Amino acid sequence: MAQQAITALDTALAALLAREIDAGAQLDGCTQLTAGASQETWCVSYRDAAGDTLRLALRRAQPTAGQAAAVGGISLATEARLLQLAAAAGVPCPAVRYVLQPGDGLGDGFLMQWLQGETLGKRIVQSPQLAQVRPRLARECGRVLAQVHAIDWRAARLDDHLPVVDPATLVDETFAVYRELDAPQPMIDYCWRWLREHLPRRSRTALVHGDFRNGNLMVNEHGIVAVLDWELAHIGDPVRDLGWLCVNSWRFGNAALPVGGFGAIDELLDGYNEAAGTDVSADELAFWQVFGSFWWAAVTLQMAQGWRSGETPSLERPVIGRRSSEAQMDCVNLLIPGDYPLPEADRALDTGTQLPMPAELIEGVAAFLKEELAPDLDPHRQFLARVGANSLRIAQRELLYGAELARAEHEQLRQLLDASGDLDALRRELSARLRDDLPLDTPGLADHLRQTVAGRLFVDQPRYWALRRD
């Protein structure tokens, strides 16, 4: 079945290239680079009439996606239009070569220019080849975002194709997504309350990229080559883009430099304010940093639910769902920082009389996937093998530490709420009180949330850089 799908893709692409790109084009091959919830990105290699090898990038909806809309609710045709508008405004981005039509047999999507550069956030933060450009990136990000936000969305009638949302609506819509999941996470409820009580006093309106961050930028030794992945674009407060770029999730371990792990907030704001002629402050940015982590905490849970329901089958989705605790811990450090206990990190795997114990069995399979199987696979399957190993090790830590952490959380909830019931019932009770009128400065509340979220993160991703190990 997979081979048939690849053959059909090759056939359709070969015909399209010869018809729309170059009459003499001969397809050499196509390689899938990424696969999101509803979109795929492919590298398309072909030879032109002169025999030269060229490449294009294909961005298209997954064949299993139920509709043409992307994750952010916009069509790929709209995303292609945004890239065209951005290029005309001087924003670095790939040129759109062709927007797919129904008769092409490739679904919804578009072909765009193939550009060279680094897109992996961790490498952008750490690569020696980018050492000279990193100190300039924060200011350059500010200038590029000013260009994005200056695009005349009214003249382009983008409000006919993009969501239009004010800050309060954005906060409440995100919270509604979380509530629909019926998976109580009291820290998310706490953040919603905080955000509602600290909404921006002034709000601008502009075209917002929606996912401008380290990981969606292509960078080389000269600077930003391209701004990618526009599927979350909307009309709203442009400061959201600035805050999202500073969220801890996108610093890739370099927490000391809040702008993407490569720069300071003052540098970002200086570049933005100078280019945009505005006076955005660090205080305005802080609200959107909290919102960004709040949004990511809810969306990762939504992704996991999509996997559980079978809507988006993927090995990666359930692991992404476990990343909610990372974003919640970022909210803890922003809103209620302080100390918290953690379990012993070096607990032996062979505790018990049964040979081998469940945690040992899991370790054997995880090590095989990551260390023996992955190196012999193609890059995409290497990634999946490592995701599989990571998933197993989360389950392993749940076996080793989950019961202990649950007992501590249960006792804390009983004392905080002065109530009885099982753990799930008490979590629901705390969420319900936070949604109602429980004061955010209730004695013991911050300590409980901080300890609970830290414990969950210790199981989900103990190496995440928001988790302190004093």
Image (cartoon, rainbow, N blue to C red):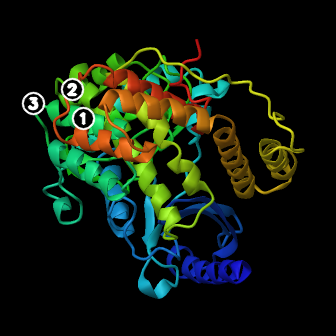
Query: Above or below — where is 331 with respect to 183?
Result: above
Looking at marks 2 and 1 on the same chain, the residue that comes earlier in the sequence is marked by: 1
Tell whether 8 sits left or right of 307. right
Query: Above or below — where is 174 with respect to 3?
Result: above
Q: What residue is disc 1 on?
A: 239
How packed is label 1: few (under 14 Cα within 10 Å), some, or many (20 or more)? many
Question: Would residue 113 be seen by someone viewing this image from the given angle?
Answer: yes
Corner quadrant of residue 393: top right
Tell whether 82 sits left or right of 274. right
How packed is label 3: few (under 14 Cα within 10 Å), some, or many (20 or more)? few
Q: What residue is disc 3 on?
A: 201
Specify the amino acid type for callout 2: Glu
Give the Cα distance between marks 3 and 1. 13 Å
Tell whether 252 sits left or right of 394. left
Question: Would residue 146 be seen by someone viewing this image from the given angle?
Answer: no
For image coordinates 48% across by 79% down, the residue present is 107
Q: What residue is disc 2 on?
A: 284
For image coordinates 56% across by 42% down, the residue present is 119
133 or 204: which is nearer to us?
A: 204
Locate the N terminus and report the quarter of the image it occupies: bottom right
Q: Where does the image place residue 369, in percent across and percent down from the top left? A: 80, 50
Tag 2 and tag 1, C-beta contact below 8 Å: yes
Specify the amino acid type for callout 1: Val
Looking at marks 3 and 1 on the same chain, the residue that comes earlier in the sequence is marked by: 3
Query: Above or below — where is 436 with respect to 182?
Result: above
Find the residue positioned furthest to the top.
470
Locate the C terminus and report the quarter of the image it occupies: top right
Q: Where does the image place residue 338, in percent across and percent down from the top left? A: 41, 15
For image coordinates 43% across by 85% down, the residue present is 102
Q: Nearer the viewer, mark 3 or mark 1?
A: 3
Tag 3 and tag 1, C-beta contact below 8 Å: no
Tell whether 4 sits left or right of 59. right
